[in-house]
Amino acid sequence: MKIKNICCIGAGYVGGPTMAVIAQKNPGIKVTVVDLNEKRIAAWNDSNLDNLPIYEPGLDKVVGEARGRNLFFSTEVDKAIDEAEMIFISVNTPTKTYGVGKGMAADLKYIELCARQIARVSTNDKIIVEKSTLPVRTAQAIKNILDNTGNDVNFQILSNPEFLAEGTAVEDLMAPDRVLIGGEQTPEGLEAIDALVNVYGSWVARENIITTNLWSSELSKLTANAFLAQRVSSINSLSELCEVTGADVNEVANAIGKDSRIGPKFLKASVGFGGSCFQKDILNLVYIAKSYGLDAVADYWEQVIIMNDHQKHRFAKNMVKTLYNTVSGKKIAFLGWAFKKDTNDTRESAAIYVADILLDEQANIVAYDPKVTAEQMYGDLDYLQTRDSSSNEKGLTVVKNPYEALNDAHAIAVLTEWDEFKGYDWQKIYDNMQKPAFVFDGRSVLDKPALEQIGFQVYVIGQ
Ligand code: UDX
Ligand code: UDX
Ligand code: ADP
């Protein structure tokens, strides 16, 4: 079966870049990305490519090439569903904030709404592709809805989890380590798998396209993220041990990472991992394990989150302690708010939690991030519901010029590893700060000896 028309529901961090690359690499397939959010779709259609709703290096070029040719962004969801032979579901699946499984289970209401909408609109057979990260066996739920509410058309469900990382999304999509496609092991299921293999096959080598049953594919996505997060929590746990023993966590990471059985990646100690996936996926894994009565398995993975929370708290508490046990009324400059560099995404960013703790201590935070808006930062703090919006606005000031944040500050906290921070005029920054001038580098990006030479008191995670 040759696919000519693809629809993707959800124009976010996953759907947008993935469809842009699929369209760029398959000029013969019409790809329509739909979203309920009109503002977001308008931004995807903005003639100025600097205004795309998400920031990803290289994305503007890909969108510029394909948009209007065979890549379209629209709010006409029903029309796009009807026209497509293959529909990707790429909507958000946040952690539930209410009811059973609150704080742990994935909230599938957006997925369910999509499934019901697809069932209502479809008048011919379709292949449905789960792109969002979902708990294992979600495909069954989607299938039940489609088969019981549809117009007697046939649906094949595939799981095709996304492994792209934000900040390198285009790179990851162009040259993926692997593409994973799970489907039913029936003749119809295998045919659907084959159709999707062909879409990716136009630029990904066949040996890098893995096909499995549905449940393996769904579970692999959750566990791949759990393994990555576990490495970060493991090295972060060692960072604390390094600080008390005199070892240097960067040296330890380098030494253990040279063992080819361990490997060098994801061993960078930090103020804590963030992002839309790691915490959510592990919580999901824990919830699933518990629901099958596998308490030891659940407890094992939950520890990865506990360590991450500890790391964020530890960083903030260390700041307070170092600043003579009080930050009340002190100006604290935040460099970075995004959960990692080269993205404007802030979901679960460590910066939010560090800010929350310091605001409880009555600090005056002045934040600068090259890509994150003030609106986003206030929204992040409000979402925690620790205090009302007006208190958040009083405690946090957001600036567009980093030096405005740094002038007169008592301390600087580096919370995202943006490259530009390294190139600042650190002598000038020192001259304009309160003394002693403290730097807390939560990402190990700055040149510690050079800063100490200038006169800064520098704390780096794990040293
Ligand atoms: C280990 C370290 O590998 C070595 O670098 C160190 O110097 C000494 O300790 P060893 O204990 O000899 O070496 O064997 P290793 O191959 O690491 O296996 C340890 C145990 O883990 C074995 O029981 C092995 O069967 C088990 N294992 C290993 C697994 O169950 N699964 C795996 O994927 C790998
Ligand atoms: C992750 C997975 O990498 C990706 O495959 C999946 O599809 C989605 O989730 P992402 O969340 O975009 O991608 O970013 P990632 O690069 O994995 O980083 C996650 C967090 O871990 C960031 O906050 C990052 O700063 C932190 N991290 C990562 C570390 O603190 N140390 C490291 O060594 C690596
Ligand atoms: P992700 O990181 O998984 O891509 P995002 O939140 O960035 O998550 O994107 C998900 C997008 O899905 C949002 O823009 C949201 O408006 C959209 N969405 C959610 N439910 C629906 C729906 N039923 N129909 C169309 N779009 C939807």
Image: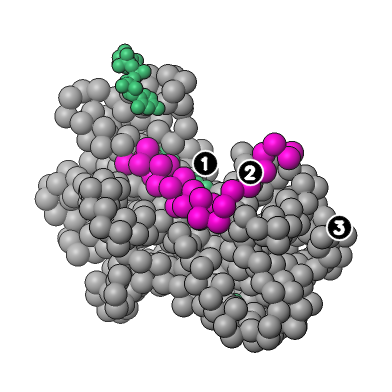
Residue named by callout 1: 419
Eye-nearest disc, 3 or 1: 3
> Badge 1: few (under 14), some or many (20 or more) residues near its Cα, within 10 Å?
few
Mark carried by residue 27: 3
Eye-nearest disc, 2 or 3: 2
Find residue 228 and report its horizontal and vertical position in percent: 42, 42
Q: What is the distance, in whole Å, between disc 1 and disc 2 at their CAs?
A: 35 Å
Q: Which residues are magenta?
A: 205-233
The reply to whether callout 3 and callout 1 are in contact (CB within 8 Å) is no
Find residue 163 and report its horizontal and vertical position in percent: 56, 49
Eye-nearest disc, 1 or 2: 2
User: Which quadrant is the C terminus positioned in?
Assistant: top left
Which residue is depicted at the point 62% across and 65% down? 157
Residue named by callout 2: 210
User: Which quadrant is the N terminus positioned in?
Assistant: bottom right
> Badge 2: few (under 14), some or many (20 or more) residues near its Cα, within 10 Å?
few
Q: Most prominent secondary structure in the magenta stretch? A: helix
* Amino acid identity at mark 3: Pro
User: Which mark is first along the chain, 3 or 2?
Assistant: 3
User: Which mark is first along the chain, 2 or 1?
Assistant: 2
User: Above or below — where is 9 with respect to 340?
Assistant: below
Q: Quadrant of ligand 1?
A: top left
User: Above or below — where is 343 with respect to 380?
Assistant: above
